[in-house]
Amino acid sequence: MSLTYHYMQLPREVIVGRGTLKRIPELLKRLNITGTALIISGKISYEIAGERVRDLL
């Protein structure tokens, strides 16, 4: 049995809870983030939230 682990360097802010997707534009504006974005997800995740995030950007 091998030990597995995940390393993540998190961004400056993480939003958790209901209705968070609609707050993405507000967060990007507050952090002064502009330009294009890359959405990385699996097929199911993209269907659940990725399309909505794409539309918000």
Image (cartoon, rainbow, N blue to C red):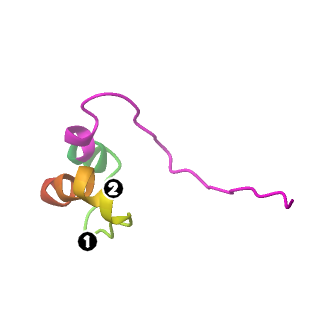
Q: Is residue 24 visible?
A: yes
Instruction: Give the mark, 1 or 2, whose residue is nearer the N terminus.
Output: 1
x 77%, y 58%: residue? 4
Q: Quadrant of the N terminus?
A: bottom right
Indicate the amino acid at tag 2.
Answer: Ser
Q: Which residues are magenta?
A: 1-24
4 and 24: which is toward the camera: 4
Asked which secondary structure carries label 1, the reply is loop
Residue at the image position 38 percent from the left and 63 percent from the top: 41
CB-based contact (under 8 Å), mark 1 and mark 2: no
Q: How many neighbours does mark 2 have within 10 angstroms: few (below 14), some (14-19), or many (20 or more)?
A: few
> Residue 45 bears which disc, if any?
2
Q: Foreground: 54 or 47?
A: 47
- Which of discs 1 and 2 lies nearer the camera? The answer is 2
**Which quarter of the figure has residue 54?**
bottom left
- Residue 29 percent coordinates (x, y): 25, 48
Q: Is residue 39 left or right of residue 14?
A: left
User: Which SS does the magenta portion mostly show?
Assistant: loop
Label for residue 36? 1
Separation of residues labelled 1 and 2 (CA atoms): 20 Å
Callout 1 amino acid? Thr
Q: Which is more toward the observer, 20 or 42?
A: 42
Mark 2, secondary structure of its residue? helix
